[in-house]
């Protein structure tokens, strides 16, 4: 598909959408915020550095405090929100904001193959996280409003950051899809995505329908008469977190920009802290917890 044909197709799809959404209206809104593309790109760069700075601050904070949701939820962070509802709403802007930018804003780079593939990776993750994962949750503790609000804000800002850069500003050299960075990064993204989904499946099936308690994820045990395939849980307590860290590290390698690197760094700090906290919690909670199992990196950490 040529660039011109692709742009006409996306424009036609936007014109079929009910309401006032259109290229011109979305662009008018962006032009009110930014006087030029150069200014918007500068803001995207600044957002990336702010995210990296926040990642460093978060790293220090998480040395003394667990991320307050799930088993670490506390009423001091606000009233509780249903776990399914909170997951759905907090992840929604991570999908809808990028979709709006791609469909209804000028997307001068969205018709190039590397940009399309990378946007596809992003949308693939967040479609599953927004519209599939919340409805598969079994039990699960309610989410404090404070944690929910912070997650919503992050998904909104990061959705704009990643999608706007890839759809309108990211320029890749010819043949980028055959470059070792892109190939390696894409393979890592897919590997991490599979690990993450498979690990979530294992955790979900540790609970019988209606149950809210916790059990040990392992491959040679039987829980509720269900034989479990342990996957990476045979080696680490945070297999689901490891999968997502690998996923976004691969994405960052394939994109090769400060914007995706900031996202990968922030995600890695949050999830690695959670993996360590889970590992310590399992060791205290279960006397028969496998002593050879590490927190996040098999055989190492």
Image (cartoon, rainbow, N blue to C red):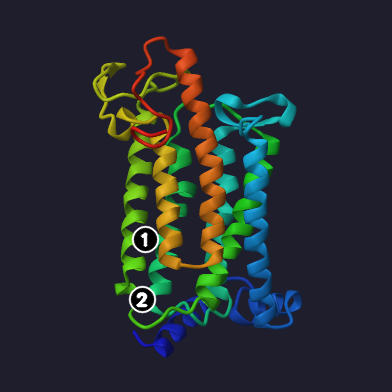
Q: Is residue 279 above or below residue 123?
A: above
Vertical arrangement, residue 213 with respect to residue 84, above or below = above
Residue occupied by mark 1: 185
Question: Which residue is pictured at 38% across the width and 20% down the height?
Answer: 216
Q: Residue furthest top?
A: 287
Q: Secondary structure at mark 2?
A: helix
Report x, y in % for residue 243. 39, 44
Along the line of sight, the residue nearer the viewer: 96 or 116: 116
Find residue 142 and report its horizontal and vertical position in percent: 60, 29
| Residue on which the image places disc 2 | 176
> Looking at this view, is 67 or 31 the one in front?
67
Q: Is residue 176 above or below residue 195?
A: below
- Residue closer to the observer: 144 or 280: 280
Q: Mark 1 falls on what kind of element?
A: helix
Residue 239 picture quarter: top left
Q: Position of residue 156 (x, y in %)?
A: 62, 56
N-term mark: 2 or 1: 2
Residue at the image position 34 percent from the left and 84 percent from the top: 1
Quadrant hosting residue 298: top left
* Horizontal side, residue 215 vs residue 170: left or right: left
Q: Quadrant of residue 162?
A: bottom right
Judged left or right of residue 301, residue 261 is: right
Instruction: Kindly tell me whether residue 91 is visible in this rendering.
Output: yes
Identify the residue shown where x is 53% and y is 48%: 267
Q: Residues within 10 Å of mark 1 (few under 14, many from 20)?
A: many
Tag 2–tag 1 contact (CB < 8 Å)? no
């Amino acid at each position: 598909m040529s660039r011109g044909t692709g742009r006409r197709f996306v424009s036609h799809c936007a014109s079929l959408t009910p309401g006032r959404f259109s290229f011109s209206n979305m662009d008018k809104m962006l032009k009110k915020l930014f006087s030029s593309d150069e200014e918007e790109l500068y803001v995207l760069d600044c957002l990336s550095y702010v995210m990296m700075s926040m990642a460093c601050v978060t790293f220090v904070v998480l040395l003394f405090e667990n991320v307050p949701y799930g088993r670490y939820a506390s009423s001091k962070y606000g009233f509780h929100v249903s776990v399914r509802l909170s997951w759905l709403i907090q992840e929604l802007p991570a999908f809808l904001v990028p979709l709006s930018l791609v469909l209804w804003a000028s997307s001068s780079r969205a018709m190039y193959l590397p940009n399309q593939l990378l946007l596809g990776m992003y949308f693939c993750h967040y479609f599953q996280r927004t519209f599939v994962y919340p409805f598969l949750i079994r039990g699960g503790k309610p989410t404090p409003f404070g944690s929910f609000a912070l997650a919503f804000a992050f998904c909104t800002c990061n959705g704009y950051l990643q999608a706007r850069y890839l759809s309108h500003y990211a320029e890749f050299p010819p043949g980028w899809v055959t470059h070792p960075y892109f190939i390696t990064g894409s393979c890592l993204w897919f590997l991490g995505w599979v690990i993450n989904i498979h690990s979530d499946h294992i955790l979900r099936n540790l609970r019988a329908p209606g149950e809210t308690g916790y059990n040990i994820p392992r491959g040679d045990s039987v829980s509720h008469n269900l034989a479990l395939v342990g996957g990476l849980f045979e080696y680490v307590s945070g297999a689901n977190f490891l999968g997502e860290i690998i996923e976004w590290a691969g994405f960052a390698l394939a994109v090769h920009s400060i914007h995706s690197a900031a996202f990968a760094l922030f995600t890695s700090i949050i999830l690695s802290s959670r993996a360590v906290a889970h590992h310590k919690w399992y060791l205290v909670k279960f006397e028969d917890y496998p002593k050879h199992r590490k927190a996040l990196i098999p055989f190492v950490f």
